[in-house]
Image: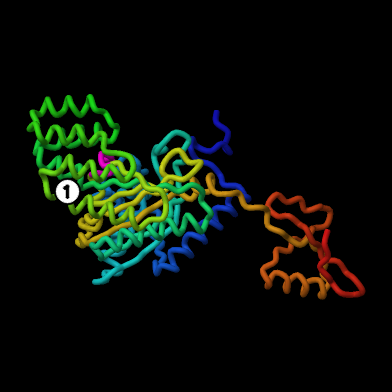
């Protein structure tokens, strides 16, 4: 029999020191987003299932916990991603005609962990920009993501660029159907050259196009990848603006950049440039984002959209640990002078911990380096 206090697999309590650190990171990131003009929204944790899984959100079906609403009898879902909800807010509640900048932070729930040892309850923070199709929106979202990481002192940042249009153009020219598209995107993302070759032969893909698919597997690395891609795709002018856009984005950034043009993860979701940001000490991408212009289509507004998200619980594992907060120790008493002194210190932003009778007030979260002492009839802060 399982003990009542044991939590389900891949769920955990966040204890004081880590919780305080996560909250500090949340405030820093959201304050950075506000400085860019992003407005905070707070969607509900529960929604009607069809709203959460409509359109591009359908990819989340297996990751979504489902339950029945006792009021309406309809099936509800616990959100596994906040982006569909923010798209709904943009489309139906705000309904602005121009640019709309929104940010959010809250828990999401996954039926299964996304990778080994990952939590099933990430604390997702993100930002979305709606209403502008130009590269300026992509640049702003990248700048915001990197500014947030800088604000929280995240080490060793690297941006990995891809573009859903690269694989999309080749698949549309092959015209081999859904099964081919699904198998090919999987093989390309896994750099499975044998799998790519088998599919090309099995579906009798035309020779020049087959060569482009095969070469695409090897199009990853530094900026020279874009020059090689121009040669590989020279026969198809549709690729030139895509490659030029990737050049412009990477030239704008002041951090190391790599490219992976065969990475088709999220092919059915992203509509253009996609990026992943890696940081020192984290084996997987910490931040993922890009352009997803169809995200609001199911809500009646398929307008331009670009954004990013990250898990604050993953972020707290890789940023420098913060020291314990300095505090002032005070005795517990009903002395009016003492109460006024404590109130004054707290109003100045100080943490004052009153030691209750019979306790030494042992604390893990605060470092009591000073105390309130009665000196010559006045309550005075002195060093411990």
Q: What secondary structure is marked by label 1?
A: helix
Q: Would you say residue 55 is visible in this rendering?
A: no
- Is 353 left, or right, of 104 in this rendering? right
Height in image: 338 above or below 237?
Answer: below
- Is 380 left, or right, of 249 in this rendering? right
Height in image: 350 above or below 261?
Answer: below
User: Percent position (x, y) of residue 278?
Assistant: 43, 45
Q: Residue at x 21, y 56 (%)?
A: 298
User: Percent position (x, y) of residue 241?
Assistant: 19, 54
Image quadrant occupied by the C terminus: bottom right
Q: Residue at x 56, y 58 (%)?
A: 24
Report the residue marked by disc 1: 239
User: Percent position (x, y) of residue 197?
Assistant: 18, 26
- Is 144 left, or right, of 167 in this rendering? right
- The quarter of the picture where residue 93 lies is bottom left
Colouring of the image:
rainbow
* Residues drawn in magenta: 261-267
CA neighbours of label 1 inside 10 A, class few (<14), some (14 to 19), many (20+): some
66 or 26: nearer the viewer: 26
Q: Would you say residue 200 is visible in this rendering?
A: yes
Residue 335 magenta-drawn?
no
232 or 182: nearer the viewer: 232
């Amino acid at each position: 029999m399982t003990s009542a206090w044991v939590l389900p697999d891949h769920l955990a309590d966040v204890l004081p020191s880590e919780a305080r650190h996560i909250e500090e990171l949340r405030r820093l990131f959201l304050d950075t987003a506000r400085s860019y003009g992003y407005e905070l929204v707070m969607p509900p944790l529960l929604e009607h299932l069809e709203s959460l899984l409509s359109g591009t959100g359908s990819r989340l079906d297996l990751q979504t916990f489902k339950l029945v609403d006792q009021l309406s009898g309809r099936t509800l879902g616990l959100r596994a991603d906040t982006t569909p909800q923010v798209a709904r807010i943009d489309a139906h509640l705000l309904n602005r005609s121009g640019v709309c900048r929104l940010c959010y932070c809250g828990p999401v729930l996954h039926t299964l962990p996304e990778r080994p040892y990952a939590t099933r309850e990430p604390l997702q923070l993100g930002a979305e920009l709606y209403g502008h199709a130009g590269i300026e929106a992509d640049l702003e979202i990248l700048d915001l993501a990197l500014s947030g990481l800088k604000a929280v002192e995240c080490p060793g940042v690297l941006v990995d660029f891809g573009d859903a249009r690269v694989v999309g153009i080749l698949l549309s020219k092959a015209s081999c159907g859904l099964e081919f598209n699904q198998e090919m995107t999987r093989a390309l993302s896994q750099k499975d050259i044998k799998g790519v070759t088998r599919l090309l032969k099995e579906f009798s893909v035309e020779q020049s196009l087959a060569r482009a698919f095969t070469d695409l597997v090897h199009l990853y690395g530094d900026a020279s990848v874009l020059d090689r891609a121009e040669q590989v795709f020279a026969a198809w002018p549709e690729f030139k603006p895509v490659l030029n856009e990737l050049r412009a984005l990477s030239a704008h950034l002041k951090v190391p950049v790599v490219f992976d043009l065969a990475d088709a993860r999220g092919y059915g979701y992203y509509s253009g440039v996609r990026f992943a940001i890696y940081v020192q000490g984290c084996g997987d991408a910490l931040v993922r984002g890009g352009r997803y212009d169809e995200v609001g289509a199911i809500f009646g507004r398929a307008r331009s959209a670009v954004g990013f998200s990250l898990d604050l619980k993953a972020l707290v594992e890789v940023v420098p640990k913060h020291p314990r907060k300095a505090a002032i120790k005070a005795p517990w008493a009903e002395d009016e002078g003492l109460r006024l002194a404590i109130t004054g210190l707290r109003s100045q932003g100080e943490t004052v911990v009153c030691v209750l009778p019979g306790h030494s007030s042992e604390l893990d979260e605060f470092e009591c380096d000073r105390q309130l002492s009665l000196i010559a009839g006045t309550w005075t802060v002195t060093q411990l």
